Image (cartoon, coloured by chain):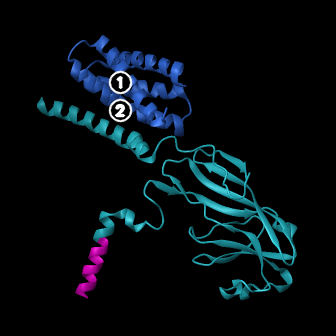
Chain colours: A blue, B cyan
Amino acid sequence: MIPMFGYILSLIITIIIEFGIIWIFIRKDISKLFLYAVLINAFTLPIATFSYQNLINNFYLIETLVIFAESILIMLLLKKKYSKALLISFVANFITAMISLLFFI
Amino acid sequence: MRNKLIILFAFVLVFSVFPQAVSADLIIPGTKSVNWCYEISNVDDYPNYVFVFNEERVTGHRVINQGDCFSFYKIGLTSIYAIPKTEFNESELNREFFEENNPQLIKSNIQLNAFGSVQENDPLQKAVITLDIISLSESSFGIQKSKVTYTYTDGTSEEKVFQSQEIMPEPSKTAIMPWWFAKFWYIILPIVAIVLIGIILLVRRLKK
């Protein structure tokens, strides 16, 4: 597969999965939730891939940083308590990380 | 005076609108230059000779000592010469000295080329091409390219041996994606996303 399509595909898969997880936790305003999932992942995924390839070659550390970064964005965008935002972010990123480990790394 | 000012203003305007025009001779948009140079591994094995490279257009000539890593103007053709130490006088080195019929010069069998440029997002940072002197007599001077040492942006390096004198061994690490996509993926996409998130939060606050 041409690498750039791999990157786009990984972004699409991540958005769909994380949107699904957020939807399980917050069952309202589906179009806004999807928009937020797109924006959050469009921000964190490219930075995470860059960091993994060029700065910190540690998958688990980068995933942890992504969980914290996304939890802040979820808290702000979805207007949820930080503890709940952290839980959503943890579950969403845990599942996408498992998929990455199983299929992509 | 007024005309000169108008011309100057036009230049500044053109080069500020099309900044890539300023560096057109230096670098192609989407590419970066690699820090490259040539070295000769066994200069010290020939103590009776002085080695000099000459690039006719811009760089000129320079004496090559053991351990020197030399580079030259990127579109210049460069030759290496050996001069018997007994006949060498550095003050004589000038453009005329390197003319074909100079009996003091022993011209090497190869011409050197510049390394060129790579994609902007390529991890290659430096290339050192090592040359070996394989034969030297009063009438002939044989050099061969033995290896190239690539250094990457992550600090790692590797050596690649020349299988053919005409073909530069490929570096193992290259750009994963086209430079324009790398720019989109690593810079534009996250910036656009965070700006839109900021706008959403700002609009929400203003509506309160």
Q: Given the image, on which type of amino acid does mark 1 rest?
A: Ile
Give the vertical position of B1 relative to A69 (above or below).
below
Instruction: Place residue B95 in its image quadrant.
Output: bottom right
Q: In this view, does B151 lie to the left or right of B107?
A: left
The residue that mark 2 highlights is A42
Give the vertical position of B85 relative to B72 (above or below).
below
Q: Given the image, on which type of amino acid does mark 2 rest?
A: Ala
Residue numbers of the magenta segment:
B1-12
Q: What numbered label is drawn on residue A15?
A: 1
The answer to whether residue B48 is visible is: yes
Residue at image position (47%, 24%) is A64
Give the vertical position of A92 relative to B208 (above or below).
above
Dot 1 falls on a residue whose secondary structure is helix
Q: Give me the C-alpha separation between circle 1 and circle 2.
A: 8 Å
Question: Are tags 1 and 2 found on a single chain?
Answer: yes
The answer to whether residue A84 is visible is: no
